[in-house]
Each structure stands twice: as C-alpha cells, then as structure tokens.
Amino acid sequence: MKSHLLDAEIRFMEKPLNGLSRFWLMLSVGTLIGAVIFPLWKIHLVAPQYQEGLQLTIYAWKLVGGNGGQDLVEINNLNHYIGMRAIRAVDFIEMKWIPFAFGLFGMLALRAAVHGKMSQVVDLLALFLYFGVFSFGSFFYRMYQYGHDLDPRAPVNIEPFTPTVLGSQQIANFLQTSLPMSGSFCLFAFVVFQLMAIWSSRKESL
C-alpha cells in the first residue's frame, strides 16, 4: 500500500502541465506585479479630536501617510507622547527585499509555465505559502515591538499593547482599524491561480 501511494505521488509530481495550467501560471505573474503597484495594508485611526481619521497605507516598498503624508507626521507626533518610536519606512527591512521576492516568485512561475512540470508548481506554491506565513508573522512582530517598546519617560503612560493587524481595537481614545487592501488580494489570487494550475492538469494521464 505504501509503495503504491509513493508511486502515485511520484507520478503526480512528474505529471506534465496542459495548456490551461500554463495559462493560470502566466496569469499569476500579473498578480505579483499588482502586489507591488497596489497597497498591501491600511491602518486607520479615529478619535474625537480626529473625526476624519488618520491613515497609514503600507506598500511592499514604502509607507504613505494620508493627506499628502501629513497623517504619518501626525501619527508619529502622537506616538511620541506615549513613548512609541517613530514609524519610518527605513526601519522596515522587509521593504528592501519583498519586491525582489515577488520578482523571484514571478520568474519561478514563468519557469514552471515553460517547463510544464507539476513538481515545479507544487514547490512554488509551498515556498510562497511559507513566505506568506513568515511575512505576516514578521508584520505582527513588528506591531508588537512598536506597542511594547515604550519609553517610560514619555509624557503619557499607557499599558503596553499590540496594534491589531486585522480588524479593529480601542487604544486609549483611538479606534484603530487594520485591513488588507488590493495588493494583498493580488497575493491571494496568486495562490488561487497556482491551485488552479495544479487542478487543471491533475486528472490527465501521463
């Protein structure tokens, strides 16, 4: 039984891709381009003194404050009062290599489309999922650091906290909302297209 399952797994990994699977792979490259162009995440802060809210938009390679960048300046001013260090793009090391990682995944998808081998698609999907979990974990840890590494000499003392990475929460008199944006949906589409590429050829004979 084990030998039969192993043989079936080997045959599956060696299975050639049909034209439809190659199409899904080619299409997936476009989603990675979108993930670089479009914003990945949005953080929005609302308080009685900021009825229209303050917004921070996160791209794969930069941070953009709302109102022409003024919102980020205002957020950092508020962070100073509670002892939180300033939010600066230069401190996000991930932004220096994530766009290149997207480019690498794009080249691997093109390689799989040209060579047309199931094992290459499976390896690509597994590597990308690992990358996604690692990146999201890194983002969460970064938020944890910002909320827990507070200066005790700050004018206003608050309990350490972790800004939410998904959803809403109350922080002092601010309601913080953090949500994915179009760039993140492009990354989700990349995974879907890899699955479609696998599914489209899985039942065909060698």
Image: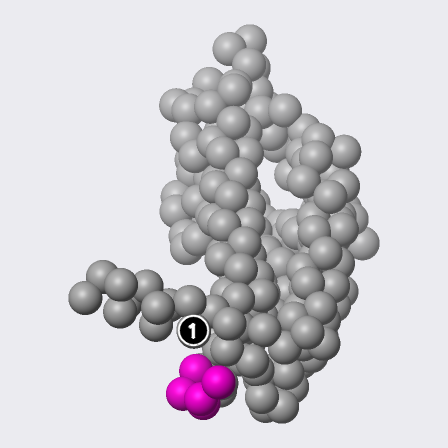
Q: Is residue 84 above or below residue 2?
A: above
Q: Nearer the viewer, residue 131 or 163?
A: 131
Instruction: Determine which quarter of the picture holds residue 87.
Output: top right
Q: Report the magenta residues as a range.
A: 202-206
Q: Position of residue 53 (x, y in %)?
A: 59, 53
Q: Is residue 197 visible?
A: yes
Q: Nearer the viewer, residue 115 or 185?
A: 115
Q: Is residue 131 above or below residue 121?
A: above
Tell me the residue at 19%/66% (across/down). 1
Judging by the rendered image, the residue that carries numbered circle 1 is 11
Residue 177 part of the magenta-drawn span: no
Q: Position of residue 66 (x, y in %)?
A: 71, 54
Q: Is residue 141 left or right of residue 87?
A: left
Check disc 1: other Cα within 10 Å, few if <14, some if 14-19, many if 20+: some
Number of disc labels = 1
The quarter of the picture where residue 33 lies is: bottom right
Above or below residue 48? Residue 88 is above
- Residue found at the far top of this picture: 153
Residue 125, position as x, y percentages in the image: 52, 63
| Residue 52 as seen in the image, left or right of residue 147 | right
Q: Amino acid at mark 1?
A: Arg
